[in-house]
Amino acid sequence: MHAVRLHSFGPAENLTFERVEDPRPGPGQVRIAVRAAGVHLLDTALREGIQGPLPELPSLPTVPGREVAGVVESLGAGVADVWLGRRVVAHLGFAPGGYAELAVTDVDRVHEVPANLDFAEAVAMIGTGRTAMGIVQFAELGPGSVAVVPAAAGGIGTLLVQYAKNAGATVIGLAGGPEKVARVAANGADLAVDYRDPEWAGKVRAQLGGRTATVVFDGVGGEVAREAVALLGPGGRHVVFGWSGEGIRDGSPYLVEGVSEQVLGPVMMQKAGGDHPVRTLELRALAEAAEGRLVPAVQRFPLAEAAAAHRALETRGTIGKVVLEP
């Protein structure tokens, strides 16, 4: 098969498209003919050798990628025959291997792809959608809510805007540059604003006409987060799930005591509860997409151009979830 491999940590150019041995499914596993593989900002950090929130860096050489969708084409021992030929999607967890024409994972991680979703959309929902479902647990949204979404043109931001609108909230979507702002407006935000404009916060206050924000969904951090939090009224919440604007290597979240709440992975899982919280959030995300309530934004790259996908993601040159297609 063909796959994208990383032989040494470093820049995007270190990702090479090459021929490798086909992986073999072990007991309880399936092998998927990959039709779409998700690219995450964390992938770019791992490529550079930055561990980030993961327990350890992968051993080299490695095939990056932890989200795949495709068709089950081979079964390991103990897996029911009914899985063969099914359209599926899976998050591989901490195991790499997604940037490839074939990927192996435990059958317990697999979900059937809803009939009305394509593979790229399914990949977006299994990772980005799962995270969005985890984030919204921390805010009570309704007709009286005013939600501010920085990075509203991104994969998570797109879904947060839709979810908040569906709940009846007034939504203010922030994005960088005219093209992204236009996408945010088309996605349904009541007010789409360019955070590169130094006067953006004042313009939002004028548009709100005395109302204040009730929640800020913040995955950006930095100055944008500081100004967004200043829009909150009494009792408002700052829900922090990342700080991409500060960089994974040296960055840190913008936090205000009594207002901010960090809701990274373990906190999301605890909130979701149950014996299988990850799967619970994945199922919620896929159901929202299957019913048409959430529609992920996807930007597609050929598998062979994984390096270009990484560069675009790192320079904020993407809109929506980045997906590789063999």
Image: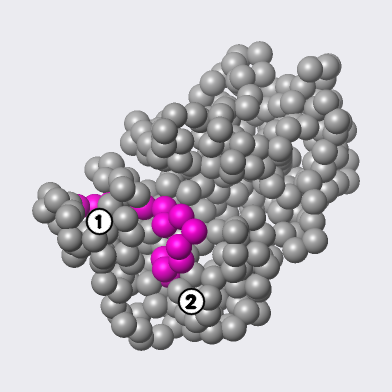
Q: Position of residue 78 (x, y in %)?
A: 17, 55
Q: Which residue type does callout 1 highlight?
A: Gly
Q: Residue at x 28, y 42 (%)?
A: 114
Mark sitting on residue 28:
1
For this view, does 44 lie left or right of residue 240? Answer: left
Estimate the spatial distance between the alpha carbons at disc 1 and disc 2, rounded to whole Å: 23 Å
State yes or no: residue 10 in magenta: no
Q: Residue at x 39, y 77 (%)?
A: 3
For this view, does 260 lie left or right of residue 310? Answer: right
Q: Residue at x 73, y 33 (%)?
A: 261
Residue 48 lies in quadrant: bottom right
Magenta range is 86-99
| Magenta span dominant secondary structure | loop
Residue that badge 2 annotates: 62
- Is 295 in front, or is 6? 6
- The residue at the far top in this view is 144
* Mark 2 Cα-neighbour bin, 10 Å: few <14, some 14–19, many ≥20: some
Residue 112 lies in quadrant: top left
Does residue 160 show up?
Answer: no
Disc 1 or disc 2, which is closer to the eye? 1
Give the quadrant of the N terminus: bottom left
Q: Earlier in the sequence, mark 1 or mark 2?
A: 1
